[in-house]
Image (cartoon, helix red, strand yellow):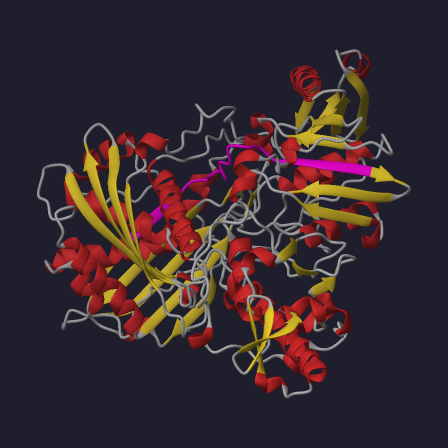
Amino acid sequence: MIPPSPLTNFPLLGHWVKLSEKNNLIFFSGRVELGQGNTTALVMMIADELDVLPSSIHLETARTDLTPNEGITAGSMSITIGGVALRWVASALKYQILEIASKQLKTQPSNLYVQSGCIYQKGKKTELYLSDTFYKIDFNRKIIDDVHLKSFEERQKSFPNINRIDLKSRLVDAPFIQDIAFDGMLYGAPVHPPSTYHQLVKIDLASLKDRPGVVKIVKNGSFLGIIANSFYHARNAAIWARSNGIWKSTLTDPVDHFQKLKCSNNVLDTIIESKDIRKNSGKWFETSVSRPFIYHGSIGPAAAIAKFEDEEILIYSHSQGVFQLRQAIANVLQKKEDQICIIHRPNSGCYGHNGADDAAFDAVLMAKSVPGKFLKVIWSRFDEFHTSPMGAAMVTKSRALLSSDKRVIAFDVEVNSTPHTNRPSSKIPNLRAASYLSKPIVSVRTPDVPLERGGGADRNASPSYDIDSLRVRKRIEYDTPYRTSALRSLGAYCNVIANETLFDKIAKELNVDPIKFRLEHVSDPRSKEILERLADERLSDTYNTSDDGTGWGLGFARYKGSGGYCGVMIKVNIDETVQVTDAISVCDVGEAISKDGIKNQIEGGIIQSISWTLKESVPVDGFSATAETWTDYPILKFSEIPNLRTILINRPAEKPLGAGEISQGPTGAAIVNAINNAIGIQVTELPITRDAIIAKLHSVT
């Protein structure tokens, strides 16, 4: 067996589990809980392998002073990598426990087993409990030397599903950063420049210091931070400073960067080229799909708490990568990493690189001037819309060659995109305020995510079908004043829409059923089952309709070409606006650990994708984003959420594949195809608003 990658750098049992002073085991994971329910699944995997109840497991997650560094929690890898690593840890731990117990009971380890925390011998309960063996555990042993994993037939017999372990706390307690309070805590508010090209020229610091409740002003270059005795006073002083400061931009002429992206003629990088697509003969079909800049759209803005004391820095953050954030802050401040401790605490859901890291650095810069005091920063909605990284704008052009026997034999994909990755790291801090300082550390061009790690702009650019000749090329456009970075599914959302709408376009030209046409291009039995299940569902009254303005559409993809499978079928009703009334999904993520958690992730992705596809677009003016409130950036309302039906194909004998990002692309494609089915036009410039439909109708008449 090949060990999970985290065990390479953290091979010892003691890296993952320790004994508390009260003789209890504490497990550790470098993964963070972002509201997706992954800690519930991780606890289930530990408990199942160890043969104890989930309620007996204590799991510490994502803090740089205790847990292993497992990288950034992203890309649906919490279970596929992090969970599998903990399964190995639990297996090795149980092996040691039975070894210790066998010596006490004077028998062979093979004669013993664990059940609900008790040790049994040949079907009879002994007097030993697991806790009786803890004091003899050797935490310096290598995990790979002791691992004896359960077979899939032995797994999840006692608790095939459990309730979310963090849900009660989130509903009735106060676990969020915004809720945390310390005695004597101060509040900080950054005053961010209007754009990445602006510098602070002048500000009346004396008048700012005299604002009500202000304790201290922190200025370093163009970084301006206000420390006050309440959030209310800090926020109001920041509003005053933003209005009364004088800013100068080095960018003098506005540029339509989205149009520039569409028309770019920069050199294309060839990512995949199998055979020569130009040698084939037949008829070419093509489509082009564009996505604007979009926000994370979290209801709660970025927040952090920091404290400087005796050259040590303590930070509470909702970063997706606490270790990477620590590296970046240490780099900028020229401190040793072990002088900085970052503890993850929850905030509003995160879907990639949002403002969490930047808010943490804002807090650090201000807390440095009030040593010994906790300082909390909560961004305003203005900060969130003007400062946090946005999802990359994209244009994907897909071409397909249809042979004389009505098969797609070649596919050619060209992707233009702004960057999908500008996360902080040890070598590239990429912290917004670091570029404001008197000695600035400016963000540099970060390479796109390589295809072997799932790809970035080119993620899912390869269609999920059997195609003989394939070429994928991409170009990344870096020169833009809008900071973009990772947002849920990266390039997969736009690329799946392009490829799936192209398949529908060909099926419509041939006058063949779109599901049948797809089935003719797949040999993978798991893909076939997804499509066949959707074909069965389409026969129901929900989708079997011919009403005017009503249509259904399909989208399908295997995420990253190696992750979870997802097919989505959407029904729309078009009147004054487009309304998604029903959404059904069929998904295969291999071994399903927490079925409720998986369904929540899939359905959350569907809802988010509906919002992206029909509503979301960042307003820009050629210099910066111009949105200030939710009125400027509408998102899907609760009243607009469709009827949802999620069918999960559980394959306990297969490895887990992850579910967090598999439904966004198929949902977007299904909406575009449903609109085409309803009114006969394919609208591929997103979002599909009323104005976009009218413009498309005018262009085809």
Q: Is residue 553 magenta?
A: no
The image quadrant where one finds the C terminus is top left
Is 656 left, or right, of 302 in this rendering? left
What x and y, as percent, mark residue 235? Answer: 66, 20
Q: Residue furthest right?
A: 310
The foreground one among 281 and 367 is: 367
Q: Residue at x 41, y 73 (%)?
A: 654
Up/down of 207 relative to 542, above or below: above
How many numbered tags mark residues here?
Answer: 0
Q: Residue at x 67, y 18 (%)?
A: 232
The image quadrant where one finds the N terminus is bottom right
Is 323 left, or right, of 588 in this rendering? right
What x and y, as percent, mark residue 552? Answer: 19, 47
Q: Is residue 436 visible?
A: no
Q: Is residue 297 magenta?
A: yes
The foreground one among 550 and 250 is: 550
The foreground one among 25 and 564 is: 25
Please report the bounds of the magenta region as a residue range: 287-307
Up/down of 31 relative to 256, above or below: below
Q: Is residue 574 visible?
A: yes
State the image quarter where residue 118 is shown.
Answer: bottom right
Up/down of 33 relative to 240, above or below: below
What x and y, as percent, mark residue 537? Answer: 18, 55
Up/down of 518 relative to 173, above or below: below
What x and y, as percent, mark residue 269? Answer: 49, 63
State the image quarter where residue 473 is shown.
Answer: bottom left
